[in-house]
C-alpha cells in the first residue's frame, strides 16, 4: 500500500508541469508569419506582447505571428548596432548605384541635416529616399522600447521611417472618432511621439527603499525627494546604475538636474508664465548659444545655468553615497528588495514590480517605491518602424496593436484578467488617456471599465501619469540638449572616479561634514576646466573640440585628482 502511494505521488509530481502547462491560444506553425523586433524590454514584456499580438493577429487576419526578438542590451547598445548596420548597408547599396563613398560617408548619410557639400548631400538624400528591404536595411522590422531620446535620435539619423503614409494613422489610435485625444503629442514639455516614433507606454522615475535597512541606519523618515539621498547616513548603502548603459537611468538623472534648474528659476522670482514666454523666445532664436533673445533677462538664463551645475553636484553627492554603480538597472530594486542596499534610484515599474515580488503574501511590503511629486516628468517609451523593414505590413500592424486598447491592457492589467497578460503582471503605465480618471464622461466610463482589472491604482495622484505630468513642466532647452554629455559626465564623475569620490566624501563626513570643510567641498565639486571650463553653454560644443573618448579620459583624470585633493584637504583640517 505504501509503495503504491509512493508511486502514485511520483506520477503526480512528474505530471504536474504537463497538467498546468500554459497552452498557447494559437499554435504557431513553422510557416507562420515572422516579425523581427530589437528591444531592451525584459523577458516578461517580450513574452506577453509576442503572444498577445499573435492572438490579436489570429483574430483579425486569420493567422498567428511568430516574433523573433533581438536582444543585445540596453538602448545604448541598440543604437550603436543600428547605426553600424545602416552605415554598412548604405555603403553597399549606394556604391552599387554608382555613387562615390568618401571616408566620412557614414557621418554624411546619418547626419541630422543634409550636408552642404554637394556629393555628401546627394548621399544623404539617396539614403533617405530608400525604404526597401532589398536596398538599405538592417534586416529588423521594429525598434520597441527605450526612451524618446534614442528614438528621436534614430529618427533624426534616418534609421526609422513613418509608419503610415499621407492618409495618416487609423482612427482610434491617437484620436477617437469624435476628435478626443487618446495619445497626446506631448505632455508639459515632454514629447511623446514624433513623425517616426510613437510612445506606447509611460514611465516616471523615483526611489525605492527598504524600511528595515533604513531603521538599521537610523533613518526614520523615508526618502521623498531626490535631495534626501544625499544624507550621509546612506553612505555605502545606495544602489545606482550607469547612465551610459541605460537611457531610462540617464533620464532619471536628467530629472534631478532639471528639478534644480526649475528651483533656481523659481527662487530668482520668475513665474511659470514668464518661463513659458521666455522659452518661446529661445525657441525662435537661431541658436542656443547665440546670446540672449531680446527681452529675456540675463538673470533668467543665469538661474538656469546655475541650477544645471548644482543639479550635477546633487547627482555627485548621491553618487558619493553609492555602494556600487551597476550596468544593469534592474539590479538596484532587486538588491533593495533583498536588503543588500538600503535605497536606490529606479524607473517606476521596476520599483513597483520588485515591491510586489519581494513582499510575502499578506505581509507589509519589504520594499517601497515612491515617485517624488514635482521631481520627475512622465516620459514615453516609443516604438519605431525601421527603414527597409523586411515585414513592413506586419510591423505596422504591431504598432497599431500596441497603441490600441488591446495592447494597452497588457501594460497594467493583472495577469489572468480578461484581456490582460496571461502570465506576468507588467505593472507599467498605459499611455492612452482613457485608462485614467477624467472629467470627460467618455474617458471616465472607459476608466471605470478598466479599473477592476488594473494592477496599480491609476486613479491615485502619485500613480496617475497625467496628474504626475501636470506637476512637472519639462523645458527641453534646460537639459534636453545636454542629455548625452550629462550621462558621460556622470559616468566619469561617479563611476570611473567613484572610488576616489566615495573615499573623499567619507573623510569629509568624518571630519565635520560639508559645512566644516569648505575647501574640501570646493575641490570635490570642481568641474573640468580643459580645454575650456565646463559650463552649461560650453557643454553643448565640448565634443566638437575633442573626440569623445579623449574627453572622457581627461574628465576621469580631472575628477580623480580633485577628489584626492579634497580628501587631503579634509584630513589636513582635522590635523589643524
Image (cartoon, grey):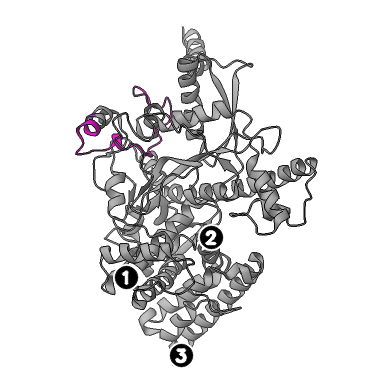
Query: Which badge, 2 or 1, is on the more N-terminal residue?
Result: 1
Report helix, strand or loop for mark 1. helix
Q: Residue furthest front?
A: 118
Measured in 3D between alpha carbons, the distance from the residue under mark 3 to the one under mark 2, in whole angstroms, is 42 Å
> Mark 3: few, some, or many residues within 10 Å (few <14, many ≥20)?
few
Q: Which residue is disc 3 drawn over?
A: 575
Does any portion of residue 229 appear in the rendered image? no
Q: Nearer the viewer, residue 389 or 569?
A: 389
Q: Are marks 2 and 1 in contact (CB under 8 Å)?
A: no
- Res 260 → quadrant: bottom left
Residue 31: name its quadrant: top right
Residue 435 painted magenta: yes
Q: Which residue is mark 2?
A: 484
Q: Residues within 10 Å of mark 1 (few under 14, many from 20)?
A: many
For image coordinates 63% across by 50% down, the residue present is 80
Residue 67 seen in render: yes
Q: Is residue 313 magenta?
A: no
From the top left corner, tell me how far across and down residue 282 is, in percent. Answer: 40, 66
Q: Is residue 555 left or right of residue 59?
A: right
Q: Which residue is tagged 1?
A: 265
Q: Residues within 10 Å of mark 2 (few under 14, many from 20)?
A: some
* Residue at point 59%, 79% (across, down): 530
For label 3, the SS is: helix
Stretch of the chain drawn in magenta: 416-445
Q: Is residue 86 above or below residue 5?
A: below
Amino acid at each position: 500500500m505504501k509503495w503504491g502511494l509512493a508511486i502514485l505521488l511520483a506520477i503526480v509530481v512528474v505530471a504536474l508541469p504537463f497538467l498546468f502547462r500554459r497552452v498557447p491560444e494559437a499554435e504557431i506553425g513553422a510557416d507562420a508569419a515572422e516579425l523581427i523586433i530589437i528591444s531592451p524590454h525584459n523577458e516578461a514584456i517580450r513574452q506577453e506582447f509576442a503572444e498577445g499580438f499573435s492572438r490579436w493577429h489570429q483574430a483579425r487576419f486569420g493567422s498567428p505571428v511568430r516574433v523573433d526578438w533581438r536582444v543585445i542590451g540596453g538602448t545604448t547598445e541598440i543604437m550603436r548596432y543600428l547605426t553600424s548596420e545602416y552605415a554598412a548597408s548604405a555603403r553597399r547599396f549606394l556604391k552599387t548605384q554608382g555613387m562615390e563613398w568618401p571616408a566620412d560617408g557614414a557621418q554624411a548619410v546619418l547626419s541630422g541635416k543634409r550636408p552642404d557639400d554637394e556629393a555628401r548631400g546627394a548621399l544623404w538624400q539617396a539614403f533617405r529616399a530608400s525604404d526597401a528591404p532589398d536596398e538599405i536595411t538592417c534586416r529588423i522590422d521594429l525598434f520597441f522600447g527605450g526612451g524618446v531620446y534614442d528614438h528621436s535620435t534614430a529618427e533624426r539619423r534616418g534609421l526609422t521611417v513613418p509608419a503610415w503614409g499621407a492618409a495618416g494613422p487609423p482612427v482610434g489610435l491617437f484620436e477617437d472618432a469624435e476628435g478626443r485625444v487618446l495619445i497626446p503629442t506631448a505632455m508639459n514639455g515632454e514629447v511623446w511621439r514624433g513623425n517616426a516614433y510613437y510612445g506606447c507606454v509611460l514611465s516616471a522615475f523615483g526611489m525605492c527603499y527598504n524600511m528595515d535597512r533604513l531603521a538599521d541606519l537610523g533613518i526614520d523618515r523615508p526618502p521623498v525627494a531626490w535631495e534626501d539621498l544625499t544624507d550621509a547616513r546612506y553612505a555605502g548603502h545606495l544602489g545606482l546604475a550607469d547612465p551610459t548603459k541605460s537611457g531610462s537611468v540617464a533620464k532619471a538623472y536628467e530629472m534631478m538636474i532639471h528639478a534644480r534648474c526649475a528651483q533656481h528659476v523659481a527662487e530668482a522670482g520668475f513665474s511659470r508664465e514668464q518661463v513659458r514666454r521666455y522659452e518661446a523666445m529661445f525657441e525662435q532664436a537661431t541658436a542656443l548659444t547665440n546670446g540672449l533673445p531680446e527681452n529675456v533677462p540675463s538673470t533668467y538664463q543665469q538661474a538656469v545655468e546655475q541650477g544645471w551645475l548644482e543639479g550635477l553636484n546633487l547627482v555627485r553627492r548621491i553618487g558619493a553615497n553609492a555602494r556600487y554603480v551597476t550596468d544593469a538597472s534592474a539590479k538596484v530594486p532587486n538588491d533593495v528588495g533583498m536588503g543588500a542596499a538600503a535605497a536606490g534610484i529606479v524607473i517606476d515599474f521596476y520599483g513597483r514590480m520588485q515591491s510586489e515580488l519581494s513582499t510575502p503574501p499578506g505581509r507589509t511590503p519589504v520594499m517601497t517605491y515612491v515617485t517624488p511629486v514635482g521631481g520627475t516628468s512622465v516620459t514615453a517609451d516609443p516604438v519605431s518602424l525601421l527603414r527597409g523593414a523586411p515585414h513592413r505590413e506586419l510591423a505596422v500592424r504591431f504598432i497599431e496593436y500596441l497603441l490600441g486598447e488591446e495592447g494597452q491592457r497588457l501594460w497594467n492589467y493583472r495577469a489572468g484578467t480578461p484581456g490582460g497578460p496571461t502570465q506576468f503582471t507588467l505593472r507599467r503605465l498605459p499611455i492612452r488617456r482613457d485608462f485614467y480618471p477624467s472629467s470627460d464622461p467618455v474617458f471616465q466610463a472607459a476608466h471605470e471599465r478598466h479599473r477592476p482589472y488594473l494592477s496599480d491604482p491609476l486613479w491615485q495622484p502619485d500613480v496617475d501619469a497625467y496628474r504626475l505630468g501636470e506637476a512637472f513642466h519639462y523645458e527641453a532647452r534646460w537639459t534636453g540638449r545636454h542629455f548625452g554629455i550629462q550621462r558621460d559626465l556622470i559616468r566619469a564623475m561617479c563611476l570611473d572616479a567613484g572610488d576616489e569620490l566615495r573615499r573623499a566624501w567619507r573623510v569629509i563626513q568624518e571630519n565635520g561634514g560639508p559645512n566644516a570643510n569648505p575647501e574640501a567641498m570646493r575641490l570635490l565639486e570642481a568641474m573640468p576646466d580643459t580645454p575650456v571650463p565646463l559650463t552649461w553653454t560650453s557643454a553643448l560644443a565640448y565634443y566638437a573640440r575633442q573626440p569623445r573618448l579623449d574627453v572622457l579620459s581627461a574628465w576621469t583624470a580631472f575628477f580623480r585628482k580633485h577628489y584626492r585633493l579634497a580628501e587631503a584637504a579634509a584630513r589636513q583640517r582635522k590635523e589643524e
